[in-house]
Image (tube, rainbow, N blue to C red):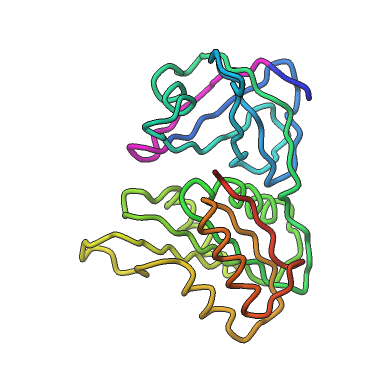
Amino acid sequence: MLWYQGKVVDIIKETPSIRRFYIQVPELETYTFQAGQHIKIEFPFNVKKNYRQYSLANAPNGSNVFELLIVLDPNGLATNYLFNEVDIGSSLKVSEPRGSFVHKPDADKDICFICTGVGLAPLRSMYLDIIKNNVPHRHMYLIFGTRYMHDMVYLEEMEQLTQRGDFTFIPVLSRETSDEWVGRRGYLHQVYKELFADKPPVDFYICGWRDMVSEARQTLLDMGFSRKSINFERYN
């Protein structure tokens, strides 16, 4: 595996517990990857497993800068280091991209992205890449589950994408109690069960915590969708 010395060129505090890290690889003219892939960051920890994997959140754009969407784990060594020790200008050892969780184009199918929290990252990379390169498709759905309104990310971008006509964004909040929220409440599984009850041609891309991904995958199989149409990546 190839490793590079990366430089943090920007940090955006998306929510109190979620940040976007922009990392440049100065020794490369272009950091080449496929939408949906992930990288490793090596940390200065005196432990056997001193690296963590993070999905790339941007579409490939020909530059040597990539974006990561990271949530703080209060008990996590790595995210505490990133949130408390890393600033603009900091150096991070980053790997080449890896992973097979990538979009498989099919002009005759809808695409349904299902995610919770920062599981949005690789799916965002995919749908931005599809849009940027005019990849043939029917309609794209993004079902995004999180707990509260203040946990939602990329909202302005989502509003712009929904104006396209081929992109439907459905956020689902599981713990929000405010009357200000007029969207879906509960868990996201009910949404795709309703949308695709008639089993139209659709490919699914699922990412998030292990339990959600496992439940979604099994539910879709029980609905009669083929294993080939269900693509997923689990976060531990």
Instruction: From the top left corner, tell me how far across and down residue 105 is, in percent.
Output: 78, 61
Q: Is residue 149 left or right of residue 202?
A: left
Q: Main secondary structure of the magenta part?
A: strand
Query: 215 or 168: which is nearer to us?
Result: 215
Residue at 65% in and 73% down: 221
Query: 49 or 134: which is nearer to us?
Result: 49
Q: Quadrant of residue 165?
A: bottom right
In the picture, the quarter occupied by the C terminus is top right
Q: Quadrant of residue 15?
A: top left
In the picture as drawn, the residue positioned furthest to the bottom comes out as: 198
Image: magenta residue range? 5-18
Instruction: From the top left corner, tell me how far across and down residue 115 is, in percent.
Output: 53, 56
Instruction: From the top left corner, tell me how far across and down residue 176 is, in percent.
Output: 28, 60
Query: 62 or 22: which is nearer to us?
Result: 22
Residue at 48% in and 51% down: 157
Q: Is residue 106 left or right of residue 60?
A: right
State how many labels appear: 0
Magenta-drawn stretch contains 9: yes
Q: Is residue 29 above or below residue 57?
A: above
Magenta-drawn stretch contains 49: no
Q: Is residue 58 above or below residue 113?
A: above
In the picture, the quarter occupied by the N terminus is top right
